[in-house]
Image: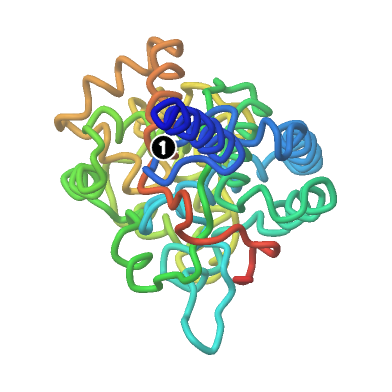
Amino acid sequence: MANLSASSRVIKLSTFTLCLLVLFGTSSGQLSANFYARTCPNFRSIITRAVNTAVRNEARMGASLLRLHFHDCFVNGCDASVLLDDTANFTGEKTAGPNSNSIRGFNVIDTIKTQLERQCPGVVSCADILSAAARDSVVALRGPGWNVLFGRRDSTTASLSAANSNLPSPASSLSGLISSFSNLGFTANEMIALSGAHTIGQARCTVFRNRLYNENNINASFAATLRRNCPSSGGDNNLSPLDSSPTSFDNRYFSDLINQKGLLHSDQVLFNGGSADAQVRTYSSNPATFNRDFASAMVKMSNLSPLTGTSGQVRTNCRKTN
């Protein structure tokens, strides 16, 4: 009887543990597709509707939400640290060089979080919202989807220094890009695929002015057109599209590179007589291959060093810790 009783206790304990895993996820760093199946079953539709509305109101917002996810994950993992405002205890990442006056979409994330807090308070993390919103943004602009896994928790701090050092610069060389991505476990081809995110969105004059006036590997008529909106001085915040179809997620970005119409220095270095040229040609001629590789690399990126289990917290306001 004692053995039977012990066995029974093990079974009951296992059942209890299983229930905890279903409700709260694991603490081993594993994410899952059905993490919120019981705690917030409608969370995906809430996020998708909000993203679709935001992109319908302003197509550029799709690129901004995708970029928010990039800039979050590249700084100490996908933990929503990029969303934190400055406090008396730390300076957040929003004023880092690659982010200041550049990253946007915080209001969309706030809207989503508010809606989710009404539906299931304290359940869905800001980091998971960023991951889902990035995917939904690409799909809204006619790009590929991918299976997003969930269970990330939110950081309680941010790192200005890590944002300044980890995020690739628009002035990066090819070797610099390869190194930056390699440091996070990405291959050169995955870096090129992820750079294809620049098939949507716009950039400010200040980040491509030097290329426009000082570089030779740029299409002459393309440069002349850009100069009308980006003078050699002034107009820092004037916008130009990152590729020739900035509101459609496609492979036009790579065709533009082959024609020396990369907007940023860090774009054109992908096709400039170096080791990335062949892959750029592949993506330029085969959109299905680009879509597949981009989706695969996004899954990998969204799984960078997540906080899980009892680590971090689920913020009720994405801009500040609980």
Q: Is residue 239 above or below residue 250?
A: below
Q: Is residue 289 left or right of residue 91?
A: left
Q: Residue at x 52, y 53 (%)?
A: 153
Q: Residue at x 50, y 69 (%)?
A: 156
Q: How many marks?
A: 1
Q: Which residue is mark 1?
A: 30
Q: Secondary structure at mark 1?
A: loop
The percent coordinates of residue 106 (x first, y second) are 66, 58
Quarter that holds the N terminus: top left
Q: How is the image coloured?
A: rainbow
Give the residue type at disc 1.
Answer: Gln
Q: Is residue 133 left or right of residue 223?
A: right
Q: Is residue 100 above or below residue 140?
A: below
Examine the image and state in which quarter residue 279 appears: top left
Q: Residue at x 45, y 10 (%)?
A: 288
Q: 86 or 43, which is in the foreground?
A: 43
Q: Is residue 198 above or below residue 99?
A: above
Q: Is residue 165 above or below residue 117?
A: below
Q: 58 or 82, which is in the foreground?
A: 82
The percent coordinates of residue 43 (x first, y second) are 73, 37
Q: Residues within 10 Å of mark 1 (few under 14, many from 20)?
A: some
Q: Is residue 306 left or right of residue 114?
A: left
Q: Residue at x 46, y 18 (%)?
A: 291
Which residue occupies the extreme front position in the image?
1
Quarter that holds the C terminus: bottom right
Which residue occupies the extreme right position in the image?
118
The percent coordinates of residue 203 (x first, y second) are 52, 51
The percent coordinates of residue 70 (x first, y second) are 45, 47
